[in-house]
C-alpha cells in the first residue's frame, strides 16, 4: 500500500507541474488551476491510505473539513479588490504549515533522540532550515496582509533597524545549529521559533509602496522551499516536488518583479526599501486641470488610437466591466484601443490581467510594458484609471525619488492624457505624480465606475 501511495504522490506531482505550466498562458490558465487543484485533492485522499496514518482519520478529516470550509467560504465572499490580501495570508498559511510540521518532528526528536538517527543528519538540518524559512514566510505574510488590508501603516522604520534584524536572524541561526547538532530542550525550541517568527515580521515591516508585489513573491518562494525541505524530512515525494516547483517559480517571479522595479534581488533581501525618499522632494510645477467625463468621452471617440492604463483604483471602483463596455463602443467607431499593463500594477503580480479577463477583455488587446511602451507617443489619448506610481515621470527624472529607476509606462509621451481619480492624493508609495500636472493632462475626478458610465453616455450621443 505504501508503494501505491508513493506512486499516486508522483502522479499528482507531475499533474501539478503540468497545471502550473498551463497557468503560464491566459487561455489555459483556468484549466491549469483545475488540474493543480484536482492533483492536490487526490494527494490528500491518497494520504488517508498511508500505512503510517494508523487510524488518525477523524483528526485528518476534521482538519480538511475546517480548513476547506473556511477557504471555500472565504474565496466565495472575497472581493477582487481584496484578492491580494487573501493570497498573502493563504501563502503565509503554507509557510506556517511547513513550520508546524518541523516543530512536531523536532519535538519528537527531543523526546526520543533515537529518531535523530532514523531521520539522518541531513534531514535534521533541512528540517531546521525549513522551520526557519516557514516561520519567516508565515509571519512576514501576515504583516503583508495587514499592510494590504489597511490594518497597518505602509512602512515602519526605526533607527538601526537592519542591525536589529541581523541580530535576530543571527541568534535564530545559532539556536538552529544547536537544535540540529544536539538534543534540544523546550526552551531552545521555543526561542528558535519565536526568533524566526520575529525576523519574518521585522523583514516585512519596512516594506511599503509599490514594493509590496516583490515581497509577496519572495514569501511565496520561501513557502515553497520550506514545504520541499519538510518533504525531505518526512520522505514525502509529493511535498518535495510540489514545494520545489512553487519555490523555483516564486524565486523566478521575485526576480521578474525586482527587475520590473529596477531593483537588485540583494537590495530586496538586505536593504531597506519602499520607505521615504533619500533626498528632498522635487517641486511640482503647474497645477491639475480638471475636465468633465463627457468631454473625455468625446475626446476618445474622435481619437484614432487610445491606450488604457488600469491600476488598483479601477479594482476599488470595480470599473472593469464599464471600461470594456466603453472600449466596445470605441472600437465600433474605428478607434484602435489597447490596454497597457505594468508588471507591478495593482497589489500583486497579474492583478490587472485577472480583472480585465473577468470583464471579458480579449487577451490580444492586453500588452505588457515592453510591448507597448514605444506606442504611447503615437496615442491620441491615454486613459489612466486608478494607476499612479507606474506612470509617474519622476521615476525617470528625480534621483531623490524612491521610484527613481523603476521602469514606467510612458503615458506622459501621449498627445493627451486623461486621468480618472477619486481625489488629488498621491499613490500607494506616497510620491506626488508629476504626470497629473503636465499641460496635456486632464483630471476627471470621481468614482471610476460612475465616471466611465458618463463617458459611455456621451459617446452614445455622437
Image (tube, helix red, strand yellow):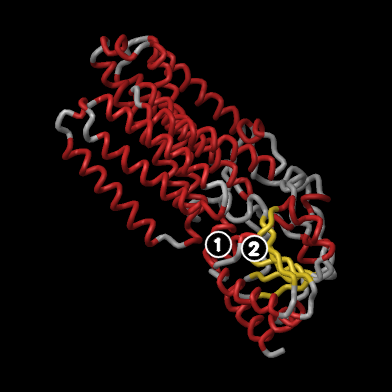
115 over 430 or under it: above or below: above
Q: For the point 50% across and 46% down, which residue is it? A: 144
Q: Nearer the viewer, residue 135 or 367?
A: 367
Q: Quarter of the image holding residue 108?
A: top left
- The residue that disc 1 covers is 357
Residue lying farthest left? 55
Residue 369 on image: x %, y % = 72, 52
Residue 254 on image: x %, y % = 60, 39
Drawn side of residue 90 relative to residue 342, left or right: left
Q: Secondary structure at mark 1?
A: helix
Q: Which mark is residue 310?
A: 2
Q: CA distance from mark 1 to mark 2?
A: 13 Å
- In the picture, the quarter occupied by the C terminus is bottom right
Residue 411 on image: x %, y % = 77, 61
Q: For the point 69% across and 40% down, which residue is it? A: 259
Q: For the point 44% across and 29% down, which residue is it? A: 196
Q: For the point 74% across and 50% down, which residue is it? A: 370
Crowding near the residue tagged with mark 2, few <14, some 14–19, many ≥20 C-alpha atoms within 10 Å = many
Q: Secondary structure at mark 2?
A: strand
Point out the frontmost of discs 1 and 2.
1
- In the picture, the quarter occupied by the N terminus is top left
Q: Upstream in the sequence, badge 1 or badge 2?
A: 2
229 over 344 or under it: above or below: above
Q: Quarter of the image holding residue 39?
A: top left
Amino acid at each position: 500500500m505504501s508503494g501505491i501511495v508513493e506512486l499516486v504522490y508522483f502522479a499528482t506531482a507531475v499533474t501539478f507541474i503540468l497545471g502550473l505550466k498551463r497557468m503560464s498562458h491566459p487561455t489555459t490558465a483556468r484549466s491549469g488551476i483545475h488540474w493543480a487543484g484536482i492533483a492536490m485533492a487526490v494527494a490528500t485522499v491518497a494520504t488517508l491510505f498511508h500505512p503510517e496514518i494508523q487510524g488518525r482519520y477523524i483528526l485528518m478529516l476534521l482538519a480538511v473539513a475546517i480548513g476547506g470550509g473556511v477557504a471555500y467560504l472565504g474565496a466565495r465572499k472575497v472581493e477582487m479588490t481584496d484578492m491580494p490580501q487573501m493570497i498573502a495570508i493563504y501563502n503565509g498559511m503554507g509557510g506556517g504549515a511547513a513550520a508546524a510540521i518541523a516543530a512536531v518532528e523536532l519535538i519528537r526528536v527531543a523526546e526520543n533522540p533515537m529518531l535523530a538517527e532514523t531521520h539522518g543528519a541531513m534531514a535534521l538540518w533541512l528540517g531546521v532550515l525549513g522551520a526557519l524559512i516557514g516561520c519567516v514566510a508565515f509571519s512576514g505574510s501576515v504583516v503583508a496582509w495587514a499592510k494590504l488590508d489597511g490594518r497597518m501603516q505602509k512602512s515602519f522604520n526605526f533607527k538601526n533597524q537592519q542591525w536589529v534584524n541581523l541580530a535576530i536572524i543571527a541568534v535564530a541561526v545559532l539556536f538552529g545549529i544547536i537544535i540540529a547538532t544536539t538534543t534540544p530542550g523546550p526552551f531552545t525550541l521555543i526561542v528558535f521559533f519565536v526568533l524566526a517568527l520575529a525576523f519574518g515580521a521585522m523583514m516585512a515591516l519596512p516594506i511599503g509602496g509599490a514594493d509590496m508585489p516583490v515581497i509577496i513573491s519572495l514569501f511565496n518562494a520561501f513557502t515553497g522551499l520550506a514545504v520541499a525541505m519538510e518533504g525531505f524530512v518526512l520522505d514525502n515525494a509529493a511535498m518535495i516536488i510540489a514545494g520545489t516547483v512553487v519555490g523555483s517559480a516564486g524565486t523566478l517571479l521575485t526576480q521578474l518583479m525586482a527587475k520590473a522595479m529596477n531593483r537588485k534581488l540583494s537590495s530586496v533581501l538586505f536593504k531597506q526599501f519602499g520607505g521615504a525618499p533619500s533626498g528632498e522632494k522635487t517641486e511640482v510645477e503647474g497645477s491639475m486641470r480638471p475636465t468633465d467625463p463627457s468631454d473625455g468621452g468625446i475626446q476618445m471617440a474622435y481619437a484614432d488610437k487610445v491606450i488604457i492604463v488600469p491600476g488598483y483604483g479601477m479594482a476599488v471602483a470595480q470599473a472593469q466591466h464599464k471600461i470594456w463596455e466603453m472600449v466596445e463602443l470605441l472600437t465600433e467607431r474605428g478607434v484602435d484601443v489597447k490596454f497597457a499593463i505594468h508588471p507591478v500594477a495593482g497589489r500583486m503580480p497579474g492583478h490587472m490581467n485577472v480583472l480585465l479577463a473577468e470583464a471579458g477583455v480579449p487577451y490580444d488587446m492586453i500588452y505588457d510594458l515592453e510591448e507597448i511602451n514605444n506606442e504611447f507617443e503615437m496615442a491620441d489619448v491615454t486613459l489612466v484609471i486608478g494607476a499612479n506610481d507606474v506612470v509617474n515621470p519622476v521615476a525617470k527624472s528625480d534621483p531623490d525619488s524612491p521610484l527613481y529607476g523603476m521602469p514606467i509606462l510612458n503615458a506622459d509621451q501621449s498627445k493627451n492624457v486623461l486621468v480618472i481619480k477619486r481625489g488629488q492624493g498621491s499613490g500607494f508609495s506616497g510620491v506626488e505624480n508629476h504626470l497629473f500636472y503636465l499641460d496635456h493632462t486632464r483630471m476627471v475626478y470621481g468614482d471610476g465606475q460612475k465616471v466611465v458610465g458618463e463617458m459611455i453616455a456621451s459617446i452614445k450621443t455622437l
